Image: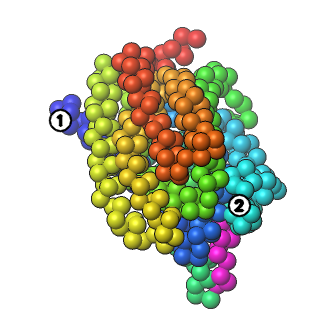
Amino acid sequence: MDERTQFRKRLLKIILPITFQQIMLGLVSASDALMLGALSQDALSAVSLASQVSFVENMFLAALTAGLSILAAQYWGKGDAGAVERVFAYTMKVTAALSAAFFLAGLLAPTWLMRFFTNEQPLIDRGAVYLRAVSPAFLLTGLSQVYQTALKNSGRAGIASAVSCMSVVANIGLNALFIFGLFGLPRMEIAGAALATVLARVLEAVWCVLETARPGRVKLRTVNIIHDDKLLRADFWKYTWPVLGNQIVWGVGFTMYSVIMGHLGTDAVAANSIANIVKNLLSSLCFGLGLGGGILLGNELGAGRLDRAREYGRRLCHLALVCGVCSALALLAVTPVILSLADLSERATYYLKWMLIMCTYNMVGMSMNVMTINGVFPAGGDSRFGFYCDTVTMWCYSVPMGCVAAFVLKWPVLAVFFIINLDEMVKLPAVYRHYKKYKWVRDLTVHEEGV
């Protein structure tokens, strides 16, 4: 087997399960939008805004699991399963504390959380009902994400995908049962969507625990939870803090986009909600390629094959560009279908049409940035650049310009949407320049042994 064929086979083995997982997760949001939209536009908008709390939690979880993935991918490539288990245990301990905080916030202060996202009282009231009911899922999500990250980075990406897909299918089916009260069940509407999410997370967490208990899997061992490996703990935070800073800067900035749109009326909120769902669903391959590419590069770097990793990085970036263009074209192709399915007001439908068109350029930039900032750079421990890049892009351009356009200049909704969706394109030149410095071509396991 030649080297290029080997590259393609290894990449496909990793990215296909991860991409399928991303698609299935996107389908949950799409099913929520369809079913809640059938109830009312306000129900759709309220849950969309309430879901920003989950988005913020996932922002923190993404940083923690990235720290786990950076180290686990390289140590697994080196063949050190014990180190993978130790960093797995430490990540789980930190994640459990974080997830518990989000669970308590959703349970005890849902109205306060909703007031941050909108000043529309009907949306606040409906969203608070959803947040209180869905709060147990905040705890379970954190635990299952750490389990799945450990599986992905120990040669079990297909199993992690199967776990997630089962949860998605269960979530969609339970959504229909509880939202509409099918087969004699009570009609719960928004609370039903929350209950479906909680039960799906329970199934997901249980399967993760059972899967890691099987022979040949990385284990969550009590001794590793109680006794930290000080060296790996220091390594974990060394590479996690910059990712966490990046996630906070990017995630809070992205949440501010929802805050801005949330204060431009229910039509803007509804259209923006569906546009984001469609964009996220169609960009699943881009995210799968980025996350899978990062794991593949981490394995090569940990094994000491630096020249091959550098060549793989080049190929992955070319694939990301092709993937972004194809995703943008697919978005244009499905736009008429989305408009015919969306049960929105005439003005919201008009907003949605142009929002979807404007998302195309964003998807091309996003594909390149996901591959580099989330995949290539962290694979070699170069996790600080994303923090610096997103700080400048989002907080020196996108958020302030969006706020000025919306609240000072009072520009039309679509003009505001155009401005805040330029962020991915704005950062591309800096990302390219940093990629060409090749600071990410590093074997972290050799470095840590010498400490």
**Mark linked to residue 232:** none
Which tag, 1 or 2, sits closer to the chain's start?
Answer: 1
Q: In the picture, which quadrant includes the N terminus?
A: top left
Residue at the spot 35% in from the left edge and 18% down from the top edge: 436
* Residue 249 x/y as whole percent: 61, 33
Q: Is residue 39 above or below residue 185?
A: above
Magenta includes 188?
yes
Look at label 2 and name its amino acid.
Answer: Glu
Q: Name the residue under label 2.
A: 120
* Residue 198 x/y as whole percent: 65, 63
Magenta includes 398?
no
Q: Name the residue under label 1.
A: 1
User: Is residue 276 something that shows in the picture?
Assistant: yes
Look at label 1 and name its amino acid.
Answer: Met
Q: Give the side of residue 370 with respect to residue 50, left or right.
A: left
Residue at the spot 70% in from the left edge and 47% down from the top edge: 99
* Residue 354 x/y as whole percent: 41, 55
Q: How crowded is mark 2: few (under 14 residues within 10 Å), some or many (20 or more)?
A: some
Which of 422/220 is in front?
422
Residue at the spot 43% in from the left edge and 23% down from the top edge: 430
* Residue 180 x/y as whole percent: 59, 80
Element assignment for label 2: loop
